[in-house]
Image (tube, helix red, strand yellow):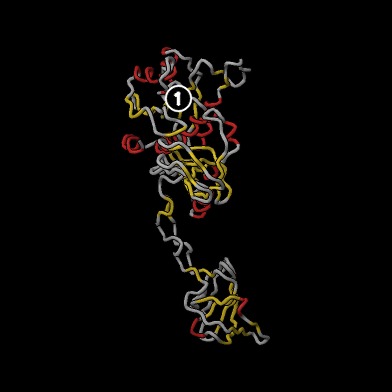
Amino acid sequence: MLRQVGASVLPPGIEVVPLSSVVGRVLAQDAVADRDYPPFDRSVRDGFAVRSADLPGSLRVTGEVRAGEVYPGRVGVGEAVEIMTGAPVPAGADCVVMVEHCVRTSDGRVSTEKQLAPGTHIAPRGCEAQNGEAVLKAGTRLDFAHVSWLATTGYAEVPVFNRPRVAIITTGDEIVDIHRTPADHQIRNSNAWSIAAQVIRAGGDPVVLPIARDTLEATQLLIEQGLQSDLLLLSGGVSAGKYDVVEHALAAAGAEFFFDRVAVQPGQPLVFGRARGTFFFGLPGNPVSTMVTFELFARAALEMLGGIADPQLPLTLARLTKPFRHKTGLTRVLPAQVRGTMVTPVDWQGSGDVASLCRANAYLVADPDRAEYLEGETIPVLLR
């Protein structure tokens, strides 16, 4: 599926935003170092800048250099300059002996029993990054560490990709708006808002459209609106029921379907395709199925539309705190609670049980060909 998306996605537009607004955005151009980092041989310890050839021994202290200063002289034979962390290493010195390993004497000398190799406790010029080096590549989603580097290298404004605009349509006669009190046979429209939250987290701008009733005409009208966005997400109406009309409405809009089912539970009925140049997903209607299939499939497509070249699922391994069994044949993606390196399955009552997800912070990912896992065995976990 990702290959199908990647082969067809046009590069998103670019805008320039202040550094204060870049967290979570996707870098649109390589961010290069504007000079060597560090721009000088830098001491990484408080101590004395010396010649390694003079160690161990007693040395004459000729001066001091702090961070933000440059020592004007040179360290000669039998000499030492007191130096602070972050300061430029004076010419002539090739190592720094830590202050803890030195003894000061009243005659202006310092002695040490240490024998050090050249370069000890020195970060050489350019060891972190060299002038012109692209430390951050286009396609990087920016976090606080990236912000620090951008500030370090003088990027007050940053080119980022535009956020994809994502239309969201919930379908079903049983669905009512969240501000209404539902009758016993109705449910509030939670899917639109959970999808919107997932879209925001994946770097998109959600556009929640009205609820589509279970008629071909009503669904077609809203699909026409949704296809004006960069991505269209529909929830519900993709099973084989009499009133599941989403695929028919998409077909009427000239849709090309890439697949309409996946071997995953929850979430088997899942439609993916493209209509008039806009990709769409028809997600299952049950809330847990909607959230799971978004994370497994739609999130990656959305990230690619936003400039991420190689989206990755946040998968890891954890050890089970108790035995786990499931029915083979499908990949099961089930609520779980991860603490450190351990994972505990969360009891759930099926794909409508949102409360179980609130008790979970991850998903177990159970192999379709393996029915049983023992306590203490590792199992793949999808972090949330």
Tell me the amino acid under the disc marked 1: Leu
Q: Is residue 278 positioned above or below 172 on the image?
A: below
Q: Can residue 239 be seen here?
A: yes
Q: Is residue 159 at all visible to an observer of this figure?
A: no
Q: Is residue 179 above or below residue 12?
A: above
Reading the image, the residue beneath label 1 is 234
Q: Where residue 105 appears, x then y in whole percent?
A: 66, 85
Count of numbered badges drawn on the protein: 1
Query: Dividing the picture into quarters, in which one does residue 178 lie?
Result: top right
Who's the residue at 66% across and 87% down the image? 107
Q: In the picture shown, does residue 264 fall above or below 60? A: above
Left/right placement of residue 229 relative to residue 24 reads left
- Residues 340 and 370: in front is 370
Looking at the image, residue 59 sits to the left or right of residue 370; the answer is: right
Q: Which quadrant of the figure contains the N terminus? A: top left
Residue nearest the viewer, comparing 44 with 116 = 116
The residue closer to the viewer here, 85 or 285, is 285
Q: Secondary structure at mark 1?
A: strand
**Nearer to the camera, 81 or 283:** 283
Name the spot of residue 143 as percent of width and height, x first: 51, 47
